[in-house]
Image: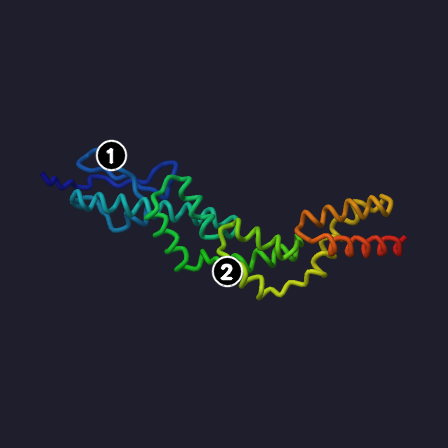
Amino acid sequence: MRVDRKISTIEPQKRHKERLNIHLDGEYAFSLDRLTAIWLHEGQTLSPEDITRLQQKDVLETAYRRALHLLSYRARSAQELERFLQDKGYAPDQITLVNARLQDEGYLNDQRFAEDWINNRVAFRPRSGKQIRFELLRKGIDRETADEALENAQLDEDALVLEAGRKFAGRYARLDQKEFMLKLGAALARRGFNFEAAKAASKQLWLNLEQDK
């Protein structure tokens, strides 16, 4: 039997001001995000269907706010955000709706994420294009998007390996040439550069250190 219920009280939670406690027929029933409850008022009658719809909308709004909070720290790929919401217990259809909303509003964009990731790596932690591609795929960027972003970036591998080497060269500056070449070459290999590129950069950086003495 259908039983409509009347809103008796709407009050903000003490610890979470963005949420409102909804009392129906004189007793606490559930809480809602302020945006979800914006059209509710005391004395309003809610059907069971109304209540279900409000609660479902609240779940989506809460998931959306959680996603925005995560994105406030740094950009994420769509797959990273999907994994985050999965870990929080949201259903696949809810995650799809939240991701679509974030994409529509410009908060989630895998193409932009890939381009920003490449620019950040080049500027602060240089590594090979191959290594950057691997990182993008691991972040959930599809191959086509990753390849397009790397092609547009037009990376200069020779410049990248030298810049990456400079960040390590000072650490090994007191070693003899053999040890310097060995350790710097290994460090550059971990950044994804091939043997020949790492060897050439290590030799050049050793010569630079010798000239500066």
Q: Which residue is located at x 53 percent, y 49 percent?
A: 138
Residue type at numbered disc 2:
Thr
Dot in front, 1 or 2: 2
Q: Viewer-proximal residue, 142 or 54?
A: 142
Residue type at numbered disc 1:
Tyr
Q: Viewer-proximal residue, 204 or 167?
A: 204
Residue marked by disc 2: 145
Residue marked by disc 1: 28
> Mark 2 or mark 1, which is nearer the start of the sequence?
1
Q: Which residue is located at x 85 percent, y 55 percent?
A: 207
Q: Viewer-proximal residue, 134 or 196?
A: 196
Residue 9 image position (x, y, % from top left): 23, 39
Q: Residues within 10 Å of mark 2 (few under 14, many from 20)?
A: some
Residue 129 bears which disc, if any?
none
Q: Which residue is located at x 82 percent, y 44 percent?
A: 179
153 on left or right of 61: right
149 on left or right of 90: right
34 on left or right of 5: right
